[in-house]
Amino acid sequence: MLLSRIESPADLKQLSEEELEELAAELREEIIKVTSSTGGHLASSLGAVELIVALHRVFDSPRDRILFDVGHQAYAHKLLTGRRDRFSTIRQQGGLSGFTKVSESEHDAITVGHASTSLANALGMAVARDVQGEDYKIVAVIGDGALTGGMALAALNKIGELGKDMLIILNDNEMSISPNVGALAGYFKSLQVQKWVQDAEKVGKGLLERISPRLFELADRAKEATKMILHQENPFYAWNLRYVGPVDGHDLKGLVYLLERLKDLSGPTLLHVVTKKGKGYSAAEKDPTNWHGASPFNPKAPTAKKSGHTWSQAFGAAVSELAKREEKLVVITPAMREGSGLSEYAREFPERFLDVGIAEDVAVTSAAGMALAGLKPVVAIYSTFLQRAVDQVIHDVAIEKLNVVFAIDRAGLVGGDGPTHHGVFDLALLRTVPNLQIAAPKDALELRAMLAAALEQGGPVALRWPRGAVEPAPAGAWPQCNWGRWEIVKQGSEVYLLAFGKTLAYALEAAGSDPRVGVVNARFIKPLDLDTLAALAGEYRLITVEDHQRAGGFGSAVLEALESLGLRPKLRILGLPDRFSDQGKPERLHAEAGIDAAGIRKALALFGVAPGLPTPRAG
Ligand code: HTL
Ligand code: MG
């Protein structure tokens, strides 16, 4: 094993070209082996193996900075930078992050998880390097998907203007999670066609010249003409970048050769490499979308495992049914068609489905435009990615009370993706926005009721649900929604648990059949059900529970409402503490934060109501 001898990238410099190839094969094997037991971003990481080996061969990390956009493709980088022994802990609680992370290794230049940040970071580092008179190299590796993000494009604009020395590597596999979208993606394809022509020409040239010198001359002229057009039109030239490519991103020798020549050039250079997502693992090559974020699998009998019926599927089914009777309904996704449960919907209603790429800001503001022009858009978005578009929610949607529904998926702690992906800030960010109503359904049936009601009544509404499984709702079932009203699920005589969203199940479990403990499905956070709250607060002690930061969340909303009602019941607020939660199984993280059934029971005990035990008499 060569890999077992690589302690740091410096060791790569000693290997022969053949050994580098061998190393790439070993890296692939290791990535497949570990991901099969941990799950993870398999297809993207397999596609970037040769590129990463070549980068570490030619550049000198950590002195030179290699920035990986999103950071989900960097498993080979982790294996080559002193983390081989811990690689099997990737995405597990306490283990290696699934993305690059500055606090994890000196070789990780940026902390990531969200897309399109590498170029602005590279710009900042280049400015810092030059201001401080240093001379290291900066290399940013960005996918074709991540390049659809406005941040990346805006950073390019400034990089080109300043002419900073850096190498940008566009890792183009024609895929985001789904097939990539956007005009640039189409342009990259046309560049690849040019490359195929060139390759074919190399083989056919001699032959054609011999058979028909006239045809050869014509073909040659046509090629020159297309080259000229392509170069004049190449948007990277307009951005004042040197463009090189497209080249084969799996030709290790070729990459090393090219990088050696590009590394000392001054000014910004963009190297366009073409890779195959999932390279070297046929199941992932054939179906890169389902192998983008793989669940644990059997490497000998690979199937991209899907967990039962999910909240995302419940939403997808509901919105597909609604679209049949509501012709103004349009669904927008920022590059998360599959994850948001929209594959079926997109097939059924292609003209009323818009994937804007990794551009949450554009998703929200284009929804505003649609609403202004008479449609009823639903923006399907993960809680964590909505963070990118808070201003658009406020400025473009909420001020004019536009008819936009935000279908917020992956709210709460999400698991192995960790702190960059936990959806634990949405309530705090959205709750302060006037005109916006916010609710969380307790199950798939309530999701349908809320979605239909939100579209019916208009105005901006945010509905949030967690990652994971939920019982499917029967097709065709459209129960009424008692808008703005909480639901008392269980009566109690002493304490009421006010549970928001996913934590309702924990609250019910904690209460058991104890007659002293009542449970409320506090499904509306805005407007809050003041009548029910006032009635309960007058007589009972209250405990709020939520899968969200304690700061600014549901409990805070209750506290603010109580203050305005002039009521001061005994109150405890259970939520996530003021720190970034680790990656790991949500159930375990919930237990650690004290928001699971055991945590709620502890809070009840502090109120002297330990379920199963009689209340101690005062004095
Ligand atoms: N929106 C934002 C701002 N960040 C992320 N990370 C996503 C959505 C979700 N996401 C990924 S990876 C990915 C998306 C959309 C596709 C990236 O495509 P790219 O790379 O072409 O850049 P490739 O996978 O190698 O093809 C994650 O959450 C990990
Ligand atoms: Mg891609």
Image (spheres, rainbow, N blue to C red):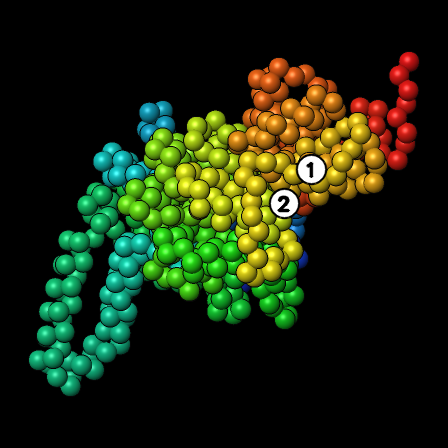
The answer to which of 600 and 525 lies nearer the viewer is 525
In the displayed orientation, state which residue is furthest to the left.
214
Q: Which residue is mark 2?
A: 442
Q: Secondary structure at mark 1?
A: strand
- Compare residues 491 and 8 and report the one nearer the observer: 491
> What kind of residue is marked 2?
Lys
Amino acid bearing label 1: Ile
Instruction: Please report the residue visible at 59 percent of the width from the left and 36 percent of the height from the top.
Output: 485
Q: Image height check: is 596 above or below 541? A: below
Q: Earlier in the sequence, mark 2 or mark 1?
A: 2
Q: Residue at x 74, y 22 (%)?
A: 539
Q: Find residue 258 and report its horizontal and vertical position in percent.
A: 33, 55
Q: Nearer the viewer, mark 2 or mark 1?
A: 1
- Left or right: where 513 falls relative to 191: right
Question: CB under 8 Å between callouts 2 and 1?
Answer: no
Look at mark 1 in the image and give the residue it sits on: 488
Q: Residue at x 60, y 68 (%)?
A: 302
Q: Residue furthest bottom?
A: 211
Residue 557 vertical position relative to residue 107 in the rendered view, above or below: above
The Cα–Cα distance between marks 2 and 1, rounded to whole angstroms, is 12 Å
**Mark 1 residue crowding within 10 angstroms, few (<14) / some (14–19) / many (20+):** some
* Residue 348 position within the rendered picture, expressed as x and y whole percent measured from the top left: 42, 64
Percent position of residue 380, x then y: 46, 48
Q: Nearer the viewer, residue 11 or 199?
A: 199
Q: Residue 110's x, y, as percent? A: 47, 37
Q: Which mark, by number, is residue 332?
A: none
- The answer to whether residue 460 of the structure is visible from this angle is yes
